[in-house]
Amino acid sequence: MREQIVDAAFEQFHRHGYNACGVKLITDSAGVPKGSFYNHFESKEALALVVMDRYGETRHLDELRTPDTPPLTRLRNHFDALARDIVEFGYERGCVYGNFSTEAADHIPAIRDGVRAAFDLWAAAITATLREAQEDGTLTNAQSPETLARFLLNAWEGAIVGERAAKDGSSFAAFFTIAFEVVLH
Amino acid sequence: MREQIVDAAFEQFHRHGYNACGVKLITDSAGVPKGSFYNHFESKEALALVVMDRYGETRHLDELRTPDTPPLTRLRNHFDALARDIVEFGYERGCVYGNFSTEAADHIPAIRDGVRAAFDLWAAAITATLREAQEDGTLTNAQSPETLARFLLNAWEGAIVGERAAKDGSSFAAFFTIAFEVVLH
């Protein structure tokens, strides 16, 4: 039953965001009685942290670590995979991290800590890839890889914000053009 | 009384986002009876559109149009002013457009249209500034000013998403470094 609740929460948090997704929506969607929720989770907040962990496993960080692929190609594959996931949902739902950061980080310390840790882990994986590209000479931009990684991660999150409104691919297109043709020169 | 409601809604929507800010929170904060709300507004959604218009007046677009200032300086002043507003709130609250896009654009067509129009207006003002900089030779980057503007606007929105979680200035610093030292070369 715990697994059913986590599966349903993954779907409903992603679809509705943090505030619009209540415990009842989750238990209804899981097909379990609302009362059973608190046998498995202390709070909606605690479940949201489990969902964030599970979401992390789907963030295509493995694309950044594929052996025998040039680092900037791996980075491109990483963002291509992230984009495909969002296009598949018709530019809806966005990124769970970005959604939780926007909706809940100001008000719920544990959510804020979880999002910050997730962004830091992701930024570190991008940083390592960029450092490799600087070392093998495919990235001539000499800015610190940490700064470049944080910028790219945020630019991606912002492209998602843009697509939530436009849903026409223009923000993703601008991201890929400027990130890969200008920033990563 | 309408003005009191709009003032309160501006504050409460910005602080809590769209979903966590109900009509009662707004009328309580305005110090007016909940019943009076519907004498002035058809719905929370209708009031949110009024708040978005008013928010637009505070987005420092005038910085982009200051006469006798070089275009890239105007762009820098524009983003500096936006950053100051957010630092003043301790990196809380974020951007009303970004918040509404993330929380409500998927589910409420009028909010989605409002955010899209606001982003388009903002992107057009940045585009005009960048075109001027390309024409006077201070911007040698030859990418289309529309694409650059959309990328920068989104990168800024994403920097805000990053700061909601980290609240340490690192995402804003990365934005200013990479946007102004790399993208706008």
Image (cartoon, coloured by chain):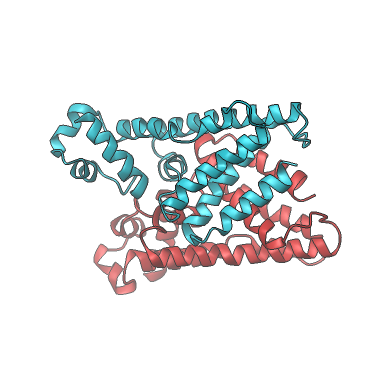
Chain colours: A red, B cyan
Q: Tell me the residue at 56%/38% (across/down).
A: B78
Foreground pick, A176 / B167 = B167
Q: Tell me the residue at 39%/57% (across/down).
A: A104
| Up/down of B136 relative to B96, above or below | above
Q: Is residue B39 left or right of residue A65?
A: left
| Res A32 → quadrant | bottom left
Q: Is residue B33 left or right of residue B87?
A: left
Question: Which x, y percent locates residue A121?
Answer: 59, 67
Question: Which x, y percent locates residue A76?
Answer: 73, 52
Q: Is residue A155 left or right of residue B91?
A: right
The quadrant of the picture occupied by the N terminus of chain A is bottom left
Question: Which x, y percent locates residue A102?
Answer: 44, 52
Question: Which x, y percent locates residue A65?
Answer: 72, 66
| Up/down of A179 relative to B142, above or below | below
Q: Is residue B24 visible?
A: yes
The residue positioned farthest toward the front in the image shown: B68
| Res B52 → quadrant | top left
Q: Tell me the residue at 55%/51% (across/down).
A: B159
Foreground pick, B176 / A102 = B176
Foreground pick, A99 / B145 = B145
| Up/down of A176 relative to A21, above or below | above
Q: Is residue A88 visible?
A: no
Foreground pick, B110 / A130 = A130
